[in-house]
Image (tube, coloured by chain):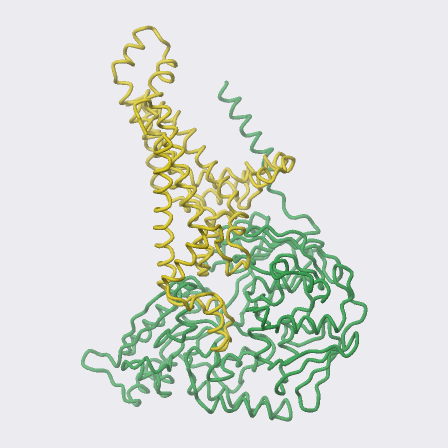
Amino acid sequence: MRLFRLALMASAAIAGASSLALAAPADDTIVVGFGADISTLDPGEIGSRSDANVAAHIFTTLTRISESGEVSPNFAESWSVSADGKDITFKLQAGRVCEDGEALTAEDAAYSFTRAADPAMKFTGNTPGFVFPSIGYTGAEAVDDTTLVVHMANKNSLAPGFLNEVYIHCKDSYEKLSKDDATAHPVASGSYKLKSWTAGSELVLEKWQDPGNFTNIVFRIIPEASTRTAELMAGNVDIITNAAPDQLDAIDASGSAKVQKVQGTRRMYVGFNQKAKFDTPGGMAIKKADVRRALQYAVDVPTICQQLLNFTCERATGLANPPHDNKDLKPYAYDPAMAEKLLDEAGYPRDANGVRFEMTLQGPRGRYLNDANVTTAVGQYLSDIGVKTTVELYEWSSVYVPMIRAHDAGPMFFLGSGGGLWNAQYDMSDLATVDSGPNYTEWNDPRWFDRWADITKATSVEEEDKIVNEMLKVFYDDGPWLLMYFQPDFYGVSNRVSWTARRDEVIELNGASLAK
Amino acid sequence: MWTYIARRLIQTVIVILGVTLISFSALHIGGDPTFLFVPERASDEQIVEARKRLGFDRPLYEQYASFVINAAQGDFGRSLTHRRPAIEVIGDVLPATIELTLFSMIIATVFAVPLGVLAALKRGTTTDGSIMILGMLGQSVPSFWLGIMMIMLFGLDLKWFPISGHVPLLEPLLTGDFATAFTNLPQSLYYLIMPSVAVGVYSLSRNARLVRSSMLEVLSLDYVRTARAKGLGEFAVVVHHALRNAWLPFVTMIGLEFGFLLGGVVVVEMVFSWPGIGRLLFDAINKRDIPLVQASVIVMSVMFVVINLIVDLIYARIDPRVRL
């Protein structure tokens, strides 16, 4: 009897206590589960996708990229380009303010640019590290309260699109903030302001101006994928990113959430490293365009996608994401007989052991969807056509990234590169120059790199597009990538909310609402 | 005793030097970490400048010596990823790990003693067998697997406990905000239960078996037979006489226990999204945030050594045969 009473009391305690912690989010709140922590909210330092997804709700930008890839006005109502193409004049919205009441004008916009570009600040974020070099930024100035001029070294028709990644903030407040303060205490110019931030745990934003349907946005940091899935299925989280492929069916069957599978913009490829140090027979072989072309037929990419990613991937024909890719190019078919024939013609027949040449294929572990298995599968396909491949898998951040960034991975390596929705040249800018950092294969074909100057001189969009398509054809025929697929993204979305995932990994919540 | 303490403190310094040297070397095995801290499209000049600014252009021995000298003066450097003093970053998360470790230790010790005693008293019976089987199971099951299973069953299916997250308890206590600590107490304990069980089960199982074997040894001694013969009740015989000697080995284990639990929390903190030093260290290692890794290693080493010192002093106090 005593034991029964104890058990009853324990059950009551548990039932009562469960009400303490397990309530679903309130109707005015949306909760997003991220796998990676947020490290900074300083506009000059923001670099990771997680940081950018939070920052996009706190800060405004001159332009924005829509879900369909259109560059549209945001803080800038309109813009015009000078005759020489080197200056863009933005007409800004009047009457905007920051969360502290300070008026947000062209002077603040100019300050946002100059602060990010200031070498004394030593920022390493996306704005100074990617956007400014990409557009050849040289300066910004306010002509009046609503007119901003951005100066560039050369004509660049992509600049308005690139500037959607420059965060506009108020000058007076940021001049008073130290770098440490700016990291954790942003002053908002967008719809939401920072309400609280518990590092490693959660970050809460509160709406202070339109647009936005939720009063509160909570970003919860949940590193473990199965825990994220469990929180989604339990109704404690509304949206999760990077749902694991093996958990998708469980989410769909839960009755409380559904998976949104989107064709992402991340280009997955196997690089052929042209660096001189790769002087083994295999390394020398892949320096020949006809060998690289032969290997394009060797890998069954659709089967890799279906079996390892549980998805029918969009195949890549080059660097550019659809719909901005070259429509005349078709994905290389899986045709091992063709691969063998081309390798024979290239002067690499099978020897007595059935081997044409040996190869090392390096890949990461735990960075991309099923990356280790994809790399292993590619290695096996190559071995099947006589390219005896040794697969080496490395831990991503502390081993593989330094190798990649030093251009020392190879001779072949598996990698993904983030792309965009809005322009082929944005995607192609990874290989803007022979010396550019993301040119991890050290490819140097002048038929590609010399054409960038032609793009600059083009006098119409049609002319630019023609040059772009010609470049993409060169890349398709003789490029340094074994073209594979665009990585799918899997989002778990609670039935409680109405929200549609984007292809470019941007989490935009202003349009999210409670499901009807 | 003071000589003993001084000797142990000197040993502590040597231990910390050794641990930091090993972790420093391990972090540099993967090559130049500069690339992790510059944008992808950084020019060669920017990379060289960053390497110089971060100090990675200096010889490794110079980098290590510089860190040790600064650390001795209380400067553990700035976290390269959090862009704040490393010790501040650690200070933010350490209370959460201490909460988890302490609660796990409570589970690992408080329940181990009665279970071990019961098994010893009921030796050879079904009770003893059941406790020992559970003990073996507890030692066989990996903590991360147990954590995930508990999440599925108790968090998702039964909805008895929260799946992940943390409500601070120690942090408001340390800052003097007792009102918040009191308000948070029920929720804090509630969030602590599953992760603490996941961390503490292995130690609970081992400790129960240790207490059982120690009790069996003591219960067979003459003085226990004498105590029974004098007519003392079983409770007095077991608790006041037998257990007092039986738990001495167990007390020694507590110091080592703390280090074991501190190491075990890393994975559990990831599974339960517990914002502690284990998760911080895991992320810092992945991102090659060398100052933060070094500072974390020092903090954890100091904690481990100090706890063991305290345990040794307590042991000397309760066992008069031990002289320091």
Nearer-the-camera pick, B261 or A496:
B261
Residue B197 placement, left or right of B251: right
Residue ID at (29%, 7%)? B229
Give x and y (percent) for residue B3. 35, 33
The image quarter containing residue B172 is top right
> For the view shown, which residue lies furthest in the top direction?
B230
Residue B247 percent coordinates (x, y): 35, 25
x 76%, y 68%: residue: A104
The hue used for chain B is yellow
Q: From what the image shows, is residue A235 above or below residue B318?
A: below
State the hue of chain A. Answer: green
- Res. A50 image quadrant: bottom right
Q: Position of residue A43 (x, y in %)?
A: 63, 66
Between A354 and B198, the one nearer to me in the picture: B198
Q: Quadrant of the C terminus of chain A?
A: bottom right
Can residue A356 be seen here? The reply is: yes
Count of residue discs: 0
What residue is shown at x 35% (from left), y 69% (from top)? A377
At x 53%, y 21%, the residue is: A5
Q: Nearer the viewer, residue A83 or A180?
A: A180
